[in-house]
Structure formats: structure tokens, C-alpha cells
Image (cartoon, helix red, strand yellow):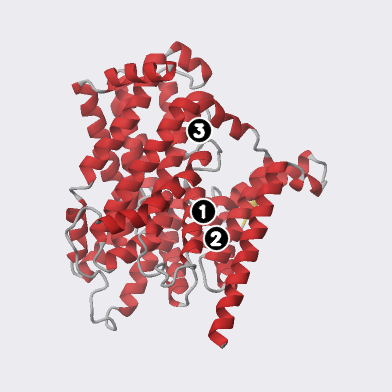
Amino acid sequence: MESLELLMGGFAQALTPMNLLWVFIGAFLGTAVGVLPGLGSAMAVALLLPVTFTLDPTGAFIMFAGVYFGGLFGDSTMGILMNTPGGSTAIATTFEGHRMAKRGRAPQALATSAIGAFIGGLIATTLVVFFAPSLADLAVNFGPAEYFALAIFAFMAVASVVSESVTKGLAALIVGLAFAVVGIDGISGTQRFTLGVPELFDGVSIIVITVGVLALGEVFYVASRIHRTKTPETGTVTGRPFLSRSEFKEALPAWLRGTGFGVPFGVIPVGGAEVPTFMAYSAERRLDRRRTVPQFGKGAIRGVAAPEAAGNATSGTAMGALLAMGLPTSATAAIMLAAFQQYGLQPGPLLFERNADLVWALLASLFVGLVMLLILNLPFAPIWAKLLLIPRPYLYAGITVFCALGVYATSAAVTDLLLVFGIGFVGFLMRRYGFPLAPVMIGVVLGPLAETSLRNAMMSSGGDASILVASPITWVLYGVLAIVLLYTAANRVRTRTRVDT
């Protein structure tokens, strides 16, 4: 009851005309920046940080709240329309979302994304308000062995599920891990696979890999087939910026399941929302295989709904972890931690005591920002979707230009431009020969975490490998993984048996 009263006080601050304006500006700018390839909510917060020097802390963080969720929706918008996600958290949404767009259902895909973002964020933020201490306790129980088990779970689950061929799935995972190990070894300080190029000492940026594999790879693939495909791949655009009753009924369970994946990951520092979005996508794909007529691969609405809800649920609870523990669990949260410190504030338990007005106004503004994003983006869905009506040569030439600009804007390094085109060619080859892209991205995102966690666990135990299975959390993760792999194998055996008979 006390939390509810404090939240009402926060709404009284957040709903003032000036603060509503800051939320609107943040949501609009976050969406606009997220639409650009290679940029995202983290970049938007970083760019806006100097702009807020003249604002009071409450106004600045209310604006950041709009940017926080707006950037996530912008990431997904470009991923759905152009197969070019603005950030890595939208990668899982892109797989089925872009297929929906090519089948003329871009507005419905964007509406599914917007509503999923609203539902996931709303549930997560509500839980943050009432259960922040319990959620924070979950992160304390994770050590190196648990993080390693989590990474292995994600590796094997994604590699075995997203492709009809386990061999191709594992090969794609190895490609992602190969990208992840380039650079200076964080523990020994030695160079690895840098070819003596100083620009590679810091590794290959996730932005470069994402844009190269997903965006330029698609551009090269379309260019290679442009004279073979008579019908434009972008299809027609249906101007209905909402979901029918049957579509809403189809998406609702996926929204809720995706939220269930996303909520706990917000308080676990695994780098952001990439892991739960891929896990939510994989879960929906497994469930889809039970259907008489599977929809995945044809533009499944649940393949958009679940990752979107998971990503925004993670972001909601990540804000709770930042405020309650001072624990930044994503790149955007880390930049917001720097913003707090800019104002002389230190997130953690004392923040709720010393700056209660700011904290509760910020939490209230998260609710306001979610509603504003829904109102702002649903009517614009058909307008965004009309981008697909641009002739393909101009459309994909524009994507290439924006990819180059987005990559160069993040580092101002010519090396990254060369890398993104090289990685784009790898993405083209993978499409050409039917290799899945999801394992590549999950390998890039979780490869460093898996390696560091394994080495830290082994060093802390003096080389005793039993530490990797010494806790109940690792038992649960490996047990669930074994069940998933056995279930997947059994399904494939049954499928082959039916085909043979």
C-alpha cells in the first residue's frame, strides 16, 4: 500500500504539462534514433546526455524514460520493415516480422510490436514498483558457474531449434563465437585473431556484426536475385494499423509468455535483452511445430509478439535493478547510471530514501512513456509501412547508405566500414546456403560472457570442473536444456518417420 501511495505521488509529478512534454520528446527521439541502422536506445541516451545539463534531474530522467522505451520500438520498426534492426535487442523480432512485412502485413507486424512492447513494459514496471527487492535477490544468486550454464543453455537451445539442420545451426553458432573472440583477451591481455591490426584490439563491435549480417547480408542477397524475382519481395501494404480479434487472440499468449521470459533477465547482468528475446522466439518456434499448419518461416505473428514483450519486460525490470541495486544490466542502463552520477546521485537502496521524489516520478514516467508510445506509434504504423512501396533498387541502396552512416557514426573508424562489408558478405553466403542467422547473433552476444564465466569459475575452484554443476541453479538450467534437446530430437525423428512412410 505504501508503494502505491508513493507511485501516485510520482504520477502527480510526471503528469505535469512540462514533464509530459519531456516524455513525448524522449519517446519521439528514441523511436527516431532507433529506426537508424546501427543506432539504438543506448546511443540515443548517450547523445541526449549533454542536452539535459540545463534540465532539473526529474525532467532529465523523465525524458530518458521516453528514450529508453522509444529506442526499443524504433529498433524493431526498421527490423520489421527492412530486415535492419536498429539494435541487437530487435534481432529476434526481425526474423518473422520482416517476413510479415514482405507478405503485405507490415502494419499488423508493427501493431503487434507496439502492443507487445506496451504489455511487456507495463507488467515489468508494475512488478518493479511492488516487488523490486525480490527481483534483486535473484541476481545475487548468479555466479560465474550459473552464467556459464545460462550461456550454454542459450547456445544449444537456439542452435538446435531455429534450423531444420542441427549441423547448420551449430555451424552458425561457431561463426558467431569466432567473431566474439577477436580482440584482446580480458584475462591474459594477449592478442587473439587481430592479424596485427590495432583497430581490432577492442574486438568487433556488436553494431558492426548486426548491421553486416542482418542488413548488408540481406542487401547483397536481394541484389543477387533481383533479376530472378519478378514480384517485388516487399509485397503490398495493408493499411490496417491494428489487430483483428483473431490476430489479437493469436498474439496474446505469446505476449504473456514473452513477458515471463523477460522479467527475470532484467536483474541479471547478461548484457541486455538479447538472451530473453531469443529464448522467447525459440519457445514460440517449438510450440509452433505442434500445430497442424506451422506458421514460422511464413510470417508468424507470435514470432513478433513474444520477443517484443520479452525485450521490453527486460528493460522494465532492468530499470528496477538500476534504481534498487545500482546494477546496470544493459548498455542503456550503464549510460543512465552515468547520467545519475552526472547529477551527483548514486542508484541503490539509499536512493529511495534520499531522492524518493525523483525515483517515484521516474517510475511513474515509465508508465506514461509506455502509453505515449502506444498512442504515438499505432497510428503511424501504415505510414512507416509505406517505406516498403519504394522501388527495391532505391530502397536497398538507401539501406546501404544508412548502414554505412550508422556504423561510421558510432566509431568514426574506416576499419569498421571495411568490416561491415566483409561481414555482410558472410551474411549473404549464409542466406544463400540456408544457414540460420539467430545462432550467429547469440554467439556474438553471449560468447564473451561464456568464456569469462568459465575461466573465472575454474580459477576460483583451482581447476575443479565440478564447480560448473555445483549449484541448484545450474542443475535446473542443464536439466531443462536436456529436456529441450531430447524433445527436439524426438520431434525430428517423428517428422522423418512420417516423411519416410
As helix, strand or loop, the secondary structure at mark 2 comes to helix
184 or 154: nearer the viewer:
154
| Number of the label disc, if any, that sits on residue 279 | 1
Amino acid beneath label 3: Pro
Q: Position of residue 449 (x, y in %)?
A: 60, 47
Residue in the image at 27% along x and 18% along y: 12
Mark 2 is surrounded, within 10 Å at the Cα level, by few (under 14), some (14 to 19) or many (20 or more) other residues, namely many
| Number of the label disc, if any, that sits on residue 498 | none
Q: CA distance from mark 3 to mark 2?
A: 26 Å
- Residue identified by numbered label 2: 158
Among numbered discs 1 and 2, the one appearing first in the sequence: 2
Left or right of residue 70, residue 489 in this image: right
| Up-down relation of residue 412 to residue 499 (above or below) | above
- Residue identified by numbered label 3: 328
Furthest residue to the top? Answer: 354
Mark 1 touching mark 2, by CB under 8 A?
yes
Q: Position of residue 36 (x, y in %)?
A: 30, 50
Mark 3 touching mark 2, by CB under 8 A?
no
Asked where in the image residue 396 lies, by quadrant, the reply is: bottom left
Residue in the image at 65% along x and 38% along y: 142
Q: Check the picture and name the quadrant holding the C terminus.
A: bottom right
* Residue 417 in sight from this viewpoint: no
As helix, strand or loop, the secondary structure at mark 1 comes to helix
Amino acid beneath label 1: Met
Asked where in the image residue 394 lies, by quadrant, the reply is: bottom left
Among numbered discs 3 and 1, the one appearing first in the sequence: 1
Q: Nearer the viewer, mark 3 or mark 1?
A: 1
* Residue 5 in sight from this viewpoint: yes
Left or right of residue 229, residue 94 in this image: right
